[in-house]
Image (cartoon, rainbow, N blue to C red):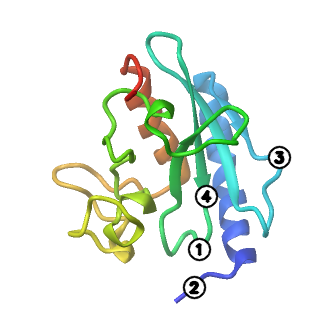
Amino acid sequence: MSVAADVSLATVKKELEAVAEYTAAAGLQLSSDSLGEQNLRFHVGFENQDGEHFYAEFDCAEYPLYPPTVDFVSEDRSERGTQRLYPQGFHTTPCICMRYNRKAYAERGGPHGDWRLLDWRLPSGNAIGIDTLALMVSDLHSKIRHSSGRLA
């Protein structure tokens, strides 16, 4: 099963309205200028309690059927997924270990063989389901702003 790029793009554009409102209110950096059918990615810049900067990339291919692949990247986006790009407190794989991150699933190299991609909108444990891009950004923001330091 797959989602056409134009469908994913339309969904992402619609949800980015709420992401843009949230990032503006929270003082975060949102970059979606290069978003298109061939590039279903946007980026958000965060800051932890020590003032260190972190940049998350949301690759929304096949969204909303599957969650985006969310990873930390360097500011210039030339490096991705290394421990030094991750805030302290995240999974040392390294991985944002949440149902809304495709990278957390075992079939994508992540630690969760007990999750199925199609169930990504379900809550984990006693939590609620994080099922929109704005909720994903808000969740990451909460985790990052309370962190200090980097994984490596």
Task: Choose between 64 and 97: the one closer to the eye.
Answer: 97
Q: In the image, is residue 64 above or below residue 103?
A: below
Pointers 2 and 1 in contact (C-beta within 8 Å): yes
Q: Position of residue 42 (x, y in %)?
A: 68, 49
Q: Secondary structure at mark 1?
A: loop
Q: Residues within 10 Å of mark 1 (few under 14, many from 20)?
A: some
Is there a contact, CB below 8 Å, between mark 1 and mark 3? Answer: no
Q: CA distance from mark 2 to mark 3?
A: 25 Å
What residue is disc 1 on? 62
Q: How many marks?
A: 4
What is the spatial separation of the Cα atoms under label 4 and label 2, in whole angstroms?
15 Å
The span from disc 1 to disc 4 (Cα, nearest Å) is 9 Å
Which of the marked residues, 2 or 3, is nearer the chain's N terminus? Answer: 2
> Closer to the camera, 146 or 89?
89
Q: Is residue 13 above or below residue 72?
A: below
Quadrant including the C terminus: top left
Where residue 33 is drawn, which disc sits there?
A: 3
